[in-house]
Amino acid sequence: MKLNKTLTMMTMTLSLSGLLAACGGNDTTNNDTNMSDQMEETMDGTDHSGMDMSGSRDVPEGLTPAENPTFEVGDTAIITEAHMPGMEGAEATIVEAYDTVVYSISYDPMHGGERVTDHKWIVHEEIIDAKADAYEPGDEVTVDAEHMSGMGGSTATIDSAEETTVYMVDFELDNGERVTNHKWVTEDELSAN
């Protein structure tokens, strides 16, 4: 019986080691990884197992700080949408606020696998060789962001576009895990406390 427990613990340890190694990909946009990367699915059924919930404070060149954001840096707000399980209802602390065009996109990951649909969000400045004007639904773009494994460099179809204020936020998932520098939450996905 003791041997079975030992073998089980060794198997779990090796599995966890492999999982952590898989999370340590080379990402130039988001340098931090955490266990939330392994979440299975969003509410809409899209597999977001490679999403970097936490990230660095680095932002794309040309992103303009918001002049009059509804929520100022340091404010708290409630997240009203769930890009990932555990987000909806979380109290977020505003880290940064930017005025830009935000897009939901669909794309085939660079490493293969199922198509990701209606991924929220990338900003205009995360598009390679972006034109000056906003893109429209149906346009194809090349993504320069690695919010999820295989996203960077992929050709994506724009599903929606909106000029708005986007926020980088810190928050705690409903399982207690802390997420820092999460990119992006839109102004209409936040409500005052």
Image (cartoon, rainbow, N blue to C red):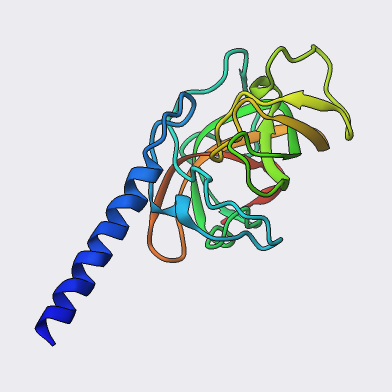
Residue at the extreme left: 2
Q: Report whether residue 59 is seen.
A: yes
Q: Is residue 115 left or right of residue 168?
A: right
Q: Report whether residue 192 is seen.
A: no
Residue visible at 53% across and 52% down in the picture: 49
Closer to the camera, 138 or 10?
10
Q: Is residue 174 left or right of residue 114?
A: left
**How far from the left and from the top, in percent, is residue 71?**
59, 39
**How far from the left and from the top, in percent, is residue 156?**
75, 32
Rendered view: 64 above or below 163: above
Residue visible at 33% across and 48% down in the picture: 20
**How far from the left and from the top, in percent, is residue 157?**
80, 34
Residue visible at 45% across and 36% down in the picture: 55
Residue at the extreme bottom: 1
Closer to the camera, 96 or 162?
162
**How far from the left and from the top, in percent, is residue 50?**
52, 46
Quadrant placement of the N terminus: bottom left
Residue 140 falls in which quadrant of the image? Answer: top right
Q: Is residue 36 left or right of residue 59?
A: left
